[in-house]
Amino acid sequence: MEKHSNFIRTIIETDLKTGKHKEIVTRFPPEPNGHLHIGHARAIVTDFESARLYGGRTNLRFDDTNPVKEDDTYVQAIINDVRWLGYEPDQILFASDYFDEMYERAIVLIKKGLAYIDDQTAEEIQATRGDLNTPGVESPYRNRSVEENLQLFEQMKACQFEEGTRVLRAKIDMASPNMNMRDPVVYRIVYASHHRTQDKWCIYPMYDYAHPLEDAIEEITHSLCSIEFEDHRPLYDWFVEMTEMPFVPRQIEFGRLNIENTVLSKRFLRQMVEEGKVKDWDDPRMPTLAGMRRRGYTPEAIRSFILSTGLSKANSTVSMSMLEAAVRDDLQEHAKRAMAVIHPLKVTITNYPKNEVEFLEAPYHPEDESLGVRQIPFSRHIYIERDDFVLEKPNKHYKRLALNLEVRLMNAYFIKATDVVYDDENNIVEVLATYDKETKSGTGFTGRKANGTIHFVEATQAVPATFNFFEPLVTGDESLPLLERINDDSWHRYQGFIEADLRQVKPQDKFQFIRNGYFNVDDDSSEDAIIFNEIVPLKSSYK
């Protein structure tokens, strides 16, 4: 954050310099009705970093004002996501903590003649709101007496009316050019058990009323939110003032971050989960933080990506390659190196001693000795990538194995392909080769130059593994409905082999499989069934 100045930081510094605030307090206020996605990461990073940079604190507060959609499962998932990103909230709070005070503040509005009970249906209220060119029509119940409104509101709280028959509305201005100020609904009746208060309440506050009061109660100095709430700010300020809250928070809006070909709609993501289009919220193809964690994205890379995109008032859209580059930069520095063969082709080295296995040593990272070294078996039988062999060298740029060509096996020897073995369908199933024992890596051999270097896995000790590769979950014409754009061919599985030294890998272990890309051990992986997810490929120049 220190390297990324922005308009929010300027506001905070001014407020501290003028003495308006002695401590900066922000909050991240998600609704617990689904998992967080990469779009939420901008809000999380902005909220926590803006406070941290100035020695302040940040609350995690759940906007649980809609009992129909909310669940404790999502509460815990969101807490886990925030902590996984590297942030520890000062307090974990809930809108429902303040239901009693919100109710009392609504009574303040009624007593001041600034709120009334409306018997119109939701459809009737919507029909009389007008539009940007037409003023709204006042409700026939707008001028009820304070006494009648207080009595009806108490009856609403006592669950004496059916759902949808009455609401509490603020009395502001039905002709306001700001549609949000046209007598917004403050409370509605909902008969659903709340995940925390159970059946204590049957009336629930609307977000536009609850949110500013929550900020005021918690003495949030800078209420940071996305730009679509800019038009709601006059209503935010109105509720704080008219309910006579002793602390006045300030709402500041910033632009949303979108990523090309990535759907950042919690409603749509939930629909894909519920309809079985994906495995769950943590499906590695999903743009949820849980999905990205499972795929192998690191919190350090996500934070770096968010900060590198900057912060402004305008919405912005960046390429997925920008996020992948941040992930690749982090993994390049920290991931262990190893060899894996994803599409195996057997090679038999005919002049290597039978039944002999030697062990070659190589570091897990060329620039980080702390990651240790690994023992690489080598014998008469190895696997190479099927794409690393052709019968005839196609052109001078081809730097892999072909008949009568010599390549170096990484960390091992030169080998030369001499013949091939076919199956009954005329497919190559084995390459026969010879090796030169004088060319062992590390001995300083300079006698001749090989036609490139390829990786391998020794066959007798190779560990079977499944490799998952992913393509974009949503593709195609952006004018079509989202569900029609789902890519049904976005998950590919292959059976291959990894080095013997990787037999004890654990979920979330990360590797750069040399010449193949960066991979993460999947959460469902076990010693008997090792599963890797491709995180990101190597840079295109190395593919």
Image (spheres, grey):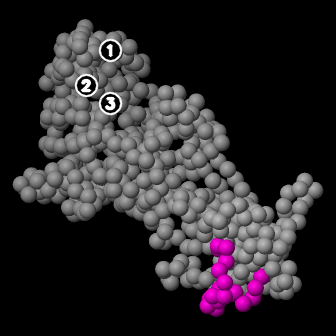
State the separation of the CA atoms marked 2 and 3.
12 Å
Q: Establish if 531 lies above or below 42.
A: below
Is 90 included in the stretch rendered in magenta? no
Discs 2/1, front: 2
Which element carries disc 1, helix, strand or loop?
helix
The earlier-in-sequence mark between 1 and 3 is 1
Q: Which mark is residue 206?
A: 3
Residue extending furthest toward the top? 140
Give the residue drawn at x 18%, y 27%: 109
Give the residue drawn at x 9%, y 52%: 20
Give the residue drawn at x 59%, y 61%: 543
Q: Position of residue 538 (x, y in %)?
A: 54, 62
Label 3 packing within 10 angstroms: few (<14), some (14-19), many (20+) = some
| Residue range highlighted in magenta | 435-453
Q: Position of residue 260 (x, y in %)?
A: 45, 42
Q: Position of residue 23 (x, y in %)?
A: 17, 58
The earlier-in-sequence mark between 2 and 1 is 1
Q: Observer-nearest residue: 174 or 414? A: 414
Main SS, magenta residues: loop
Picture quarter with the N terminus:
bottom left
Which element carries disc 3, helix, strand or loop?
loop
- The type of residue carrying mark 2 is Asn
Q: Looking at the image, how many numbered discs can be counted on the residues?
A: 3
Q: Quadrant of residue 434?
A: bottom right
Is 436 included in the stretch rendered in magenta? yes
The residue pinned by badge 1 equals 125
Which element carries disc 2, helix, strand or loop?
helix
Q: Position of residue 372 (x, y in %)?
A: 56, 83
- The type of residue carrying mark 1 is Ile
Q: Observer-nearest residue: 221 or 452? A: 452
The residue pinned by badge 2 equals 180
